[in-house]
Amino acid sequence: MIELQHLTIGYGNRAVLTDINQTIPDGQMICLLGANGVGKSTLLRTLSGFIPPLSGKVLLQGRELSSLSLSELSRSVSVVLTERVEVPNMKVVDLVGMGRSPYTGFFGTLSSEDRDIVGKAIEMAGIASLAGRTTDTLSDGERQKAMLAKALAQQTQVILLDEPTAFLDFHAKANTLRLLSQLAHETGKSIFLSTHDVEMALRLSDILWIVLEGRILSGTTDSLTQDGTLKRFLEPFELSDLQTSHIQGS
């Protein structure tokens, strides 16, 4: 579980979001929604430890994130970014095996236990048939699943994903988010992702975080519909109440 206590994030002296008080619970998938430039990527980078908060605290299982060593952090939080991974001649199984580097060192040799963990991660991500393929032959959807398998092999309690469905077609988007939701529920991991796929997030997330008017508002799709938050958020997208009702009722 991650707790944000009076968290202010940004770069230098420029605050992007202030006084955030939210919780990312175990065993749930949380989707972060918001327009471009509102601070979604900054929040993800702060939660992953890439940049420090301007003020406030990020607590991971009760410990302040800034107090964790690099080794402790890499065994607690894994990050899946949008950028394409292009490593010539690297097989998927070897890419996923890199998820074991917090335990073996970057050039460490995988033990039989490590290889078993890699195999299970590949199976969980649904890419057993791709294990022997090289990464440069994968589609965007296959590549995203391979990166997810790498994160699973890292065996962290928290997985953070930045736009994991970017550049995917409709079916690949749906399959990716369904897989993430399933993994959260079956493994008890905290899965937190930013996305522009509003309809998918409304359908599949356990909790929504919506960046609106400089604040993060959180809740289920039902609760955010009832209190009017979703209507205010969706108005700039010119989605009608009828569309919103269809999304909610499907």
Image (cartoon, rainbow, N blue to C red):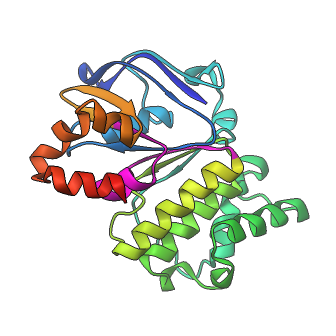
Query: Which region shows up in magenta?
Result: 188-209
The residue drawn where x is 82% and y is 66% is 115
Q: Does the magenta run of residues contain 103?
A: no
At x 40%, y 59%, the residue is 82
Residue 224 left/right relative to 30: left
Place of residue 53 in the rendered image (x, y in percent of width and height, measured from the top left): 41, 22
Q: Quadrant of residue 165?
A: bottom left
Position of residue 220 measured from the top left corner of the image (x, y, whole percent): 42, 38
Q: Is residue 195 visible?
A: no
- Quarter assignment of residue 243: bottom left
Picture quarter with the C terminus: bottom left
Front-most of 245 and 119?
245
Q: Is residue 195 magenta?
A: yes
Q: Residue sitting at 27 percent across and 34 percent down?
A: 211
Count of residue discs: 0
- Compared to 246, does 205 lie above or below? above
Identified at 58% across, 33% down, the residue is 25
As displayed, is residue 73 above or below residue 121?
Answer: above
Residue 175 in percent (x, y) is at 48, 69
Residue 214 visible in this rendered orientation of the protein: yes
Q: Residue 106 versus residue 220: which sits nearer the camera?
A: 220
Residue farthest along the right direction in this orientation: 112
Q: Nearer the viewer, residue 221 or 215?
A: 221
**Quadrant (top left/top right/bottom left/bottom right) for the N terminus:** top right
Q: Position of residue 232 (x, y in %)?
A: 16, 36
* In the image: residue 15, left or right of residue 206: left
Could you say which is closer to the camera, residue 231 or residue 173?
A: 231
